[in-house]
């Protein structure tokens, strides 16, 4: 057997997957988001330019496509959907802003697989392109929180928020952080953090080493080094979230793994997920449209929900979810091959009336009955020689065991 590729998975039961997709579509439509789809194949340059050259995703995790020799294009499987959405916004010359869109589909990152971390995984990606108002951030976060809490009935999660300031604030803060790390406390950080300090200093906060984490708890915070405008916006965001009754925790070490963020960043995390605890994450990215070639910058905000992680959480409360039950199943059982044609005709007629019908064409009556039971049939429709001769069907109620013979043309009204 050729096994599936490492870090991928087969979904043999899509009940929860489809439940989430249907629920988020309904939820976002109410908020006036529209659905888009972008390709899975994109240029490597798109991500180099947007996520940042030194981010883990770009430097280590890209699935690059080996190209034909004559091709000069460098292609990859998309690792995320924000940069492709922005590319589509620019390329599609969208003029109506804010452009509120969502999409869902597979993403690819060459990460070390573990619980909740895959090399091919699914995201629902939500973006609001072209809005500078801090109220938009609050609304976006509230909309996600309402989805998790009210629609999906999740309880065991927390919302972590930080504010990274504008580009200039980031420059000031990077200098302050560097000074701190060059002081006595910074001498015992790990070698990887030493390298990050020189190359991309904010990435030190991704370090899982407990000693480094202890040191970073005492590091100066970005929110203490914001310009006047950003400080006001940070306060406004907190006030608005309070007004909208969103519970959150301020997390000064939350900087997110992609370089395009500024100002608001957030993650929804759950203890029930283990080490990979974020099931939704996002933030503001005010420069990305300009960076990717848009005529003017479009301040934007968005988030992505990790489907596999959300499914792990929903599996724990599956019984409480309003999953629409499948329609009642009725199974047609011809007793010999002489009744097969009649069985097919009856199935066709009943399916045309919208009934859910399956046929059992093999095995003894006893084994077919057992199988129909296992399939959860509500009624079994038995067709033997005498039924064929009299244009009738023996209808058996699988719950009560009651049997009655009815005319074939009147079967449908006897199935409830
Ligand atoms: P991200 O934090 O890289 O952000 O991913 C968002 C979510 O996708 C994570 O919180 C997690 O639930 C899920 N995820 C990420 N990597 C994996 C993986 N290897 N296996 C399973 N799930 C994973 C972004 O992708 C940004 N584009 C989000 C965004 C949209 N920011 C603004 N707009």
Image (cartoon, grey):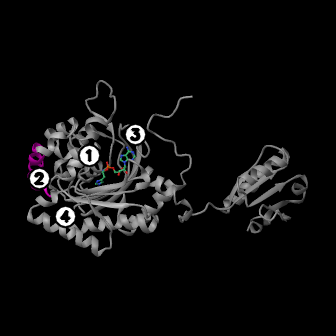
Q: Quickly name the residue at label 2.
A: 173
Chief SS of the magenta region: helix
Q: Earlier in the sequence, mark 1 or mark 4?
A: 4
Contact, CB < 8 Å: mark 1 with mark 2?
A: no
Q: Quadrant of residue 300?
A: bottom left
Q: Is mark 3 within 8 Å of ligand 1?
A: yes
Residue 171 on the magenta span: yes
First along the sequence among labels 3 and 1 = 3
Q: Name the residue under label 3.
A: 119
Give the quadrant of residue 191: top left
Residue carrying label 4: 132
- Mark toward the start of the polypeptide (3 vs 4): 3
Please say whether residue 355 is visible from this viewpoint.
yes
How many neighbours does mark 2 have within 10 angstroms: few (below 14), some (14-19), or many (20 or more)?
Answer: many
* Mark linked to residue 206: 1
Residues shaded magenta: 165-183
Please determine whether, in this image, residue 239 is positioned above or below residue 24.
Answer: below
> How far apart in space, not on screen, are marks 1 and 2 (Cα)?
17 Å
Quadrant of the rendered image containing residue 408? bottom right
Is disc 3 placed on a helix, strand or loop? loop
The answer to the question of whether label 3 and label 2 lie on touching residues, with beta carbons closer than 8 A, is no
Report the mark closest to the observer, 3 or 1: 1
Q: Which of marks 1 and 4 is in front?
A: 1
Q: Earlier in the sequence, mark 3 or mark 2?
A: 3
Mark pair 3, 2: CA separation: 34 Å
Name the secondary structure under disc 2.
Answer: helix
């Amino acid at each position: 057997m050729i096994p599936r590729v490492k870090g991928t998975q087969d979904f043999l039961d899509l009940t929860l997957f489809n439940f989430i997709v249907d629920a988020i579509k309904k939820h976002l439509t109410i908020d006036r988001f529209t659905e888009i789809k972008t390709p899975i194949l994109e240029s490597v340059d798109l991500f180099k330019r947007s996520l940042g050259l030194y981010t883990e995703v770009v430097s280590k995790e890209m699935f690059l496509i080996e190209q034909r020799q004559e091709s000069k294009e460098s292609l990859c499987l998309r690792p995320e959907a924000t940069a492709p959405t922005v590319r589509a916004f620019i390329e599609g010359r969208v003029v109506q802003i804010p452009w509120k869109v969502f999409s869902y589909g597979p993403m690819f990152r060459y990460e070390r697989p573990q619980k909740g971390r895959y090399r091919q995984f699914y995201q629902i990606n939500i973006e609001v392109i072209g809005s500078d108002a801090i109220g938009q951030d609050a609304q976006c976060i509230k909309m996600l929180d309402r989805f998790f809490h009210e629609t999906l009935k999740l309880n065991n999660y927390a919302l972590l928020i930080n504010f990274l300031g504008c580009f200039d604030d980031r420059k000031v803060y990077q200098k302050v952080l560097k000074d701190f790390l060059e002081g006595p406390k910074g001498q015992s950080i790990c070698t990887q953090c030493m390298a990050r300090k020189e190359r991309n200093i904010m990435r030190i906060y991704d370090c899982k080493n407990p000693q480094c984490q202890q040191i970073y708890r005492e590091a100066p915070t970005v929110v203490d080094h914001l310009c006047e405008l950003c400080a006001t916006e940070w306060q406004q965001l907190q006030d608005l979230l309070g007004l909208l009754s969103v519970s959150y925790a301020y997390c000064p070490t939350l900087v997110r793994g992609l370089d395009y963020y500024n100002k608001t960043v957030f993650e929804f995390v759950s203890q029930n997920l283990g080490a990979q605890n974020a099931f939704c994450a996002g933030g503001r990215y005010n420069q990305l449209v300009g960076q990717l070639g848009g005529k003017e910058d479009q301040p934007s905000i968005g988030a992505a929900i990790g489907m596999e992680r959300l499914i792990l959480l929903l599996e724990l409360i599956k019984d409480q979810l309003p999953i629409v039950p499948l329609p009642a199943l009725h199974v047609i059982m011809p007793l010999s091959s002489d009744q097969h044609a009649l069985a097919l005709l009856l199935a066709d007629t009943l399916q045309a009336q919208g009934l859910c019908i399956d046929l059992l064409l093999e095995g003894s009556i006893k084994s077919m009955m057992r199988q129909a039971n296992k399939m959860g049939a509500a009624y079994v429709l038995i067709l033997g020689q005498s039924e064929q001769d009299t244009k009738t069907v023996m209808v058996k109620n699988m719950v009560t065991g009651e049997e009655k013979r009815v005319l074939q043309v009147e079967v449908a009204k006897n199935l409830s």
